[in-house]
Image (tube, rainbow, N blue to C red):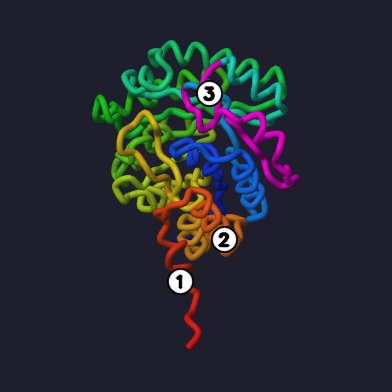
Amino acid sequence: MSDLPSQISVREVGPRDGLQNEDPVPTQAKVELINTLSGTGVKRIEAVSFVRPDAIPQMADADEVWRGIERAGSVRYSALVPNLRGAARALDSGLPEIEAVVSASDTHNRKNVNRGTEESLDDIAAVIELAHDRGSTCQVIVSTAWGCPYEGDVPVERVIRVAGRALADGADCISFGDTTGMATPGRVRTLIGEFRSAYPDAKLNLHFHNTRGTGLANVLTALELGVDDFDASVGGLGGCPYAPGATGNIATEELVHMVEDMGVTTGIDLEAMIEAAAAAERIIGRQLPSQVLRAGPRSRTITA
């Protein structure tokens, strides 16, 4: 394990990616969850998404949530934006970091934002320019990077081409999203290898789902390739409302539990994150999929 990164950066995406796949949650509950997460040691939180309320009603209160949270100085908060209008709203609200998303699959992109992949890339170029003009950063998320529920496998060269266009237009970082949980370790190794060959200096984030039970195996593969930036969602909340069956991001506490035991630091207090997962479960009102939430860390003992 000596070749693994000594530390990784974890972005907590539960408040946005997690809650957008649930029935609408009260604004104050969202605020309290973000405040709880801000106290776990996590350094980055995807807090809200500035989308049309009729498109994703779960995020209709983004402005209220962003105004209501207690912003920790140690945490960098971000927002997902679907287009230039959403980017302007986020930047007007003072977000230091935004994320624009485009699907490598043209069909999924049309289902998601009612336009083709190339049209979205044209819009994202303007989003990147606006973010930089305002002194903010813009990450471009390439979703369906390992497969599409409508088209099936997406050619690696197409995924690389989409990411390359975003980088050429000034994206500060690329994120590959396993939107429907179709990634496996071999496919992760192939895509990351091709991407690193083409763009060795580009910043890379990975966003895995555990839909088919390979989420942490994919993380381990990526770690072995030197990737040190991952998304995760408290309790395993999340999915994609435009991808049938794609529920369940990797759970933040499970990611932390695994990598810290391998000597890879995260800066996150595992017990505090488990408590946050329990809070998320109470907010949602159903059992979340995280096994570490159920069993606790491996070091926890039972009082005789």
**What's the CA distance linking mark 1 and mark 2?**
16 Å
* Helix, strand or loop for disc 2: helix
Q: What element carries label 1?
A: loop
Residue drawn where x is 61% and y is 30% of the image: 62
Note whether residue 172 is visible: no
N-terminal-most mark, 1 or 2: 2
Magenta stretch, residue numbers: 55-83
Residue 63 position within the rendered picture, expressed as x and y whole percent measured from the top left: 66, 29
Q: Are marks 1 and 3 in contact (CB under 8 Å)?
A: no
The residue that label 1 is drawn on is 298
Q: Calculate the distance from the C-alpha at mark 1 to the C-alpha at mark 3.
A: 42 Å
Amino acid type, label 3 = Pro
67 part of magenta stretch: yes
Question: Marks 1 and 2: CB-CB under 8 Å?
Answer: no
Label 1 Cα crowd, 10 Å radius (few <14 / some 14-19 / many 20+): few
- Using residue 2 as the reference point, say whether residue 158 is left or right of it: left
Q: Name the residue under label 3.
A: 53
Q: CA gap, disc 2 to disc 3?
A: 30 Å
* Residue toward you, 118 or 161: 118
Choose the circle earlier in sequence order: 2 or 3.
3
Earlier along the polypeptide chain: callout 1 or callout 3?
A: 3
| Residue 36 in picture, x, y percent from top left | 64, 52
Across and down, in percent, residue 274 comes to: 53, 60
The three-letter code of the residue at mark 2 reads: Glu
What residue does disc 2 label? 275
